[in-house]
Amino acid sequence: MVDNGNIDATSFAETVDREITLENMNKMRGRRKWKRYGADIIPFWYSSPDYPVPPEVKEAAARAIEDECFEYSWFPETLEAMAETTRSKYLIDSTVEDVKVIPGVEPSLYLSTMYACKPGDEVILPSTMFGPFIRAIDYVHAKPVYHEIRQEDDWRFDLEEMKSLVTDRTKLIFLCNPHNPTGRVMTEEELKGIADIAVDHDIIVATDDLHDNILFDGRKHVSIASLGPEIAERTISMFGLSKTFGLAGIQIGWLVATNKEILAGINKIAEGLIQGTSSIALAVAHAVLTKCDPYIPPLVDYLQGLRDYGVKRLKAIDKVNVVPPEGTYILWPNISDYGLTSAEMQEYLLEKGKVAVSDGSSHGPGGEGYIRIVFPTSKAIFSEGLDRIEEALSRL
Ligand SMILES: Cc1ncc(COP(=O)(O)O)c(C=O)c1O
């Protein structure tokens, strides 16, 4: 990563292009992303970036180890930093009392569902969605009720349809904003419409905003809980550090519930099972939240260039359809015109193209016909992977 104080888009791009090469990656650091399928495979399957973390992250981790922060974790300044970020960045009227540290956003999806639902209750969510949302619903024997989102609508929500799905058993609405896997960023107007449905029908909203920093074309992230006290008091907001700088392995995130009853209920479920996270993770999170924001604009600039390049390359392939993502580092092309299922296409590209993508069908009922390409790498690696995909598809 470029030196602090000299963080600009050009030097960031130069560093990534110089350091992130196939040769470097192939011998790299035991990372699951690169190791799972072997050195000859380009990994677009895993949502983790290749670019190096900011030096502040490594320094914070090293200092925590040097200071022997191995006791039960106690970092009130990290909680304060989370609360401050929640207030100043996400504009949620909250205090440190409303924040709970969780070892990642994924456990928060489960805690929210366990809090809001009993077996047989209904959860409204989009027909295409990051798999763990669906598994969390299944875990509590609740019922997923999908509102359809469509590629031809650029993945926008149809709020009338959403409203028509509400029943007496609807206890939870799940949001993922920005959305994994479509890359959609919800507008304030859309979120207000969802807030109205939730308030009118007394439904809890749990929103996973993990990809909130990766926004293209000047878009702004809006947290639904910032839209007023009525929606705030029924929202569980989930934030984390796993995506922007690739810190999933340190296992930290936080949830915010300004409604004391909700937070107490979640604490009760988590009691003894989830005791915050490690001291090292808390030290790192403090550094990320207080020092690393300047790295974000050049990063997003670089990713937007990759997004544009990837969309152009995919659109040039006859039978592939793709909507440019508005945020996230994920492409979600439709490949159904090839007459293969998503699982078959994933296997074909792995075997014949030497590229690992994800099978869209694990992302809800709307995921069949799609593959997921995760692209936070260098232009050289991205372009090599796209060459391989194009060549393999040309043989079908
Ligand atoms: C939308 C979304 N939520 C949650 C997660 C998992 O988050 P964490 O690593 O913080 O548990 C991911 C990881 O890809 C994700 O994309």
Image (cartoon, rainbow, N blue to C red):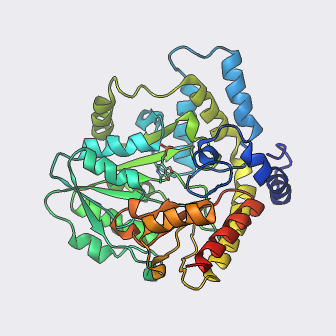
Residue occupying the point 32% across, 37% down:
260
- On screen, residue 31 above or below 357: above
Residue 216 position within the rendered picture, expressed as x and y whole percent measured from the top left:
63, 67
Identify the image quadrant of residue 52: top right
Compared across the picture, whether 388 is left or right of 6 comes to left
Residue 395 position within the rendered picture, expressed as x and y whole percent measured from the top left:
60, 78
Nearer to me, 14 or 88: 14
Compared across the picture, whether 192 is left or right of 288 comes to left
Residue 259 position within the rendered picture, expressed as x and y whole percent measured from the top left:
32, 42
- On screen, residue 189 above or below 23: below
Compared across the picture, whether 93 is left or right of 204 comes to right
User: In which quadrant will I find the C terminus?
Assistant: bottom right
Residue that sits furthest to the bottom in the current view = 318
Q: Is residue 285 visible?
A: yes
Mark count: 0
Identify the image quadrant of residue 313: bottom right
Residue occupying the point 45% across, 78% down:
336
Residue occupying the point 70% across, 73% down:
309
- On screen, residue 396 above or below 252: below
User: In which quadrant will I find the N terminus?
Assistant: top right
Q: Is residue 328 visible?
A: no
Residue 9 position within the rendered picture, expressed as x and y whole percent measured from the top left:
80, 59
Nearer to me, 53 or 288: 53
